[in-house]
Amino acid sequence: MPLALRFTSASQLPLELDGILPERVQALSQGAIEKLLIRHGNRLEPLAEHFAISGSIDDGTLIFESAMPSGHGIGTGMTAGVIRVVGHAGRRIGAQMRGGRIEVEGSAGDLLGQGMSGGRIAVTGDAGDHVAGPLPGSRRGMTGGVITIAGSVGAFAAAGMRRGLVAIGQSAGAGLGYRMIAGTLVVQGPCAPNPGLEMKRGSIVLLDRAIELAPTFRKAGAFRPVFLRLLARELASLNATIDIRAFGMPLDLFHGDLLTLGKGEIWTRAGALASETQA
Amino acid sequence: MTPPNTPGPRPNLVEPGAFAEAFPMTATRLVVTADTPAWALTAAQTMTGYATSVIACDAEAGIERVLDESETPDGRPGASILLFAFSRDALEKAVSNRVGQCVMTCPTTACYSGLPAGEKTIAVGGRLRYFGDGWQISKQLGGKRYWRIPVMDGEFLCEETFGTVKGVAGGNLIFLGEDPRATLAVAESAAAAMRSIPSVILPFPGGIARSGSKVGSKYKALRASTNTAFAPMLRGQVETTLPSSVRCAYEIVIDGLSLEAVEDATRAGLEVAGAMQNQLVAVTAGNYGGKLGPYHIKLENLI
C-alpha cells in the first residue's frame, strides 16, 4: 500500500517539497512524516499543514494525489522507490535524482530532471524549459537515467546533456540539445530551428518531416545502423510515445556541430531537412 | 547400421567405474547477429574455428545454437556461442581477438553478451573500440554500454563487457566399437543429441575427437600426446585399456556453463549409446585417475 499525500491547502505560494522522498519517509512513523518540514513561501512548515497523509510506504511508493503546479522539487535527490504525481507538478521534478522512478500523470514545470544522474522520469503531459539541463553553475546537464515525456517540452531541452536517454513525444522548443556533450535524445514532433547547436557528441533523433539544421552540420548519407534497432527496442520497452516504425527504414545522418568537436550526430527521416527539400 | 530398437543398455555397455574427469574453466556466452541467418552463422563458425582444446588453442569454443529474430537483442537472426579458457584474462584476450578478427570483419554483424554482467566480466567492445581510431561512439541503452565502431558497411556494434561464469570443461564420453563406421555413426547420433542440451558445446570437429590425448610425452616440448592406451593399432606394443575386440574409439568432449549441463549432455549421449548398443562394444570416459579435475562424472550414475 503506498503512502498517499493529498494537497489540502488553498495556498498559491510555492511549496518546496525537496526531501519528501520514499527512502527518507520509509524509516519514519506517520507522526514523524507529518512533522517533516517543507518550505512554504519563505517559511518552514510541517507537511501536515498542507497535505492529508494516509497509507504507508511499505511498497516504496509515495503518491501525491492531487495536482500541485506550485509544488516544486518533488523527488529531488531521490535514490530509490517510486513517486507518483496525479496531476500537474511544478519545477525541478527529479532534480539531481540518482535512482528510483517518478511518474507524473500530468505536466511538469521547468528544470525537469535537472542534474539527474540515474533513475527514470515519465511525464504523461508536457514539460517546461531546461529538461535534463545542468545545475546552476554547471555546463553538464543530465549524466544518466531516462526521461520520457509524452507531450511537448520548452526551450533548451537536453542542453549540456552528458549521458542518458530523453524521449519527447511531441514538439521541442528552441535550443534543443544545445551544447550537448553526449547521450541520446529522441523527438517525435517538430522542433525549433537549429537543434544541437554547439553539440560535441551525442545522438539526436528527430522524427518530424521538416527539420531545419544549422549549416554547421554535414550530411553523411542515409543509414540504418544496428544501434537504432536497439534504441527502438529500448523506447518500446519504456512505453515512450515515439513511433518506432520510423526506425525501420534508413535515416539521414548529419554530423556536427562542426563549430565545436563535430562528433555529434543528428538523425532525421530521409529528406526531412528543410533546405534539401527546398533545393 | 542396426536400428535403435533395443529397450535399454545391456549391463556391460558402460564400463564399470568409468567416470569423466572435468575441471573448472572460465566461460562466457556471446550472441552474434547479422542481417541474415547465413551471415550470422558464418561469423559464428569463423570465430569458433581452431578452438577445440586449450592444449594448443587460446580457447575452447563452439556454437551453442542458432537463434531466431525473437531471441536476439537487436531482433535479427543470430547464433549463441560459448567460449572457455583457463583464466578470465586468457578468456578476455581470446574473445576480443576472435570477435575482432572474425565477427567485426564479417558483413552486417553485431556482438552482444549472452550472460548477465554480474560481478565478473571481460572487456570485449571496450577493447575493440580502439579500432575506431577515435571515431568510435559509446552508447548506453537499457543499462548496458555499447561501442559503435565505424566500418566499411556502416558500423560494428559490440557490447562493452561480457559476463563470465565458472564453467565446467572436459566432460567426455568414449565410444568403443569393432566397426569404425558403425562406431562413428553412434558418435554422430550421440553428438546430435548432446548438442540439443542448453549451455553446452562439443568443441571438436563435428563434436567428435579421434585423437584423444594423454598428459605429457616422451618429447619434452609437448604437453600432451596421443592416448596410447586408447589407440587400437598400438595393441601389443603398449598397455591398452581397450577390450580385445575394439578396433575404434571416438570421444565426445563436453564443455558446459555448469556441471548440471555437462551431466545432462552426458546423459543424452548415453541414451543414444543405449539405443544403438548393438553397434558398440562399450562406452567409457576419459580421466586422469581422479587427480586432476574436481568434477568426477560417473557414467553409471547417469544411466
Image (cartoon, coloured by chain):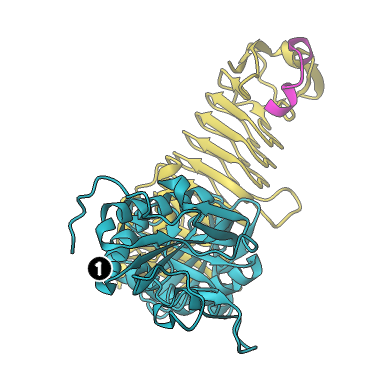
Chain colours: A yellow, B cyan
Quadrant placement of the N terminus of chain A: top right
Residue A83, compared with residue B171, is above or below; it is above
Q: Which of the image's four quarters has the C terminus of chain A?
A: bottom left
Q: In which quarter of the image is residue B138?
A: bottom right
Residue A75, compared with residue B282, is above or below; it is above
Seen in the image, is B120 located left or right of residue B249? right
* Residue A44 % position (x, y): 82, 21
Where's residue A73, x and y in %? Answer: 68, 32
Residue B68 visible, this orientation: no
Q: Mark 1 points at which residue?
A: B182
What residue is at 64 percent from the left and 66 percent from the top? Answer: B87
Numbered label tally: 1
Q: Which of B100 and B143 is in front in this view?
A: B100
Residue stretch in magenta: A21-32
> Does the segment drawn in magenta span residue A245?
no
Q: Residue at x 34, y 74 (%)?
A: B247
Q: Does the magenta stretch include residue A24?
A: yes
Residue at screen point 54% across, 31% down: A103
* Relative image position of residue A2 (x, y in whole percent): 59, 18
Instruction: Name the kind of residue labelled 1 in the image.
Output: Ala
Left or right placement of residue B24 versus residue B75 in this view: right
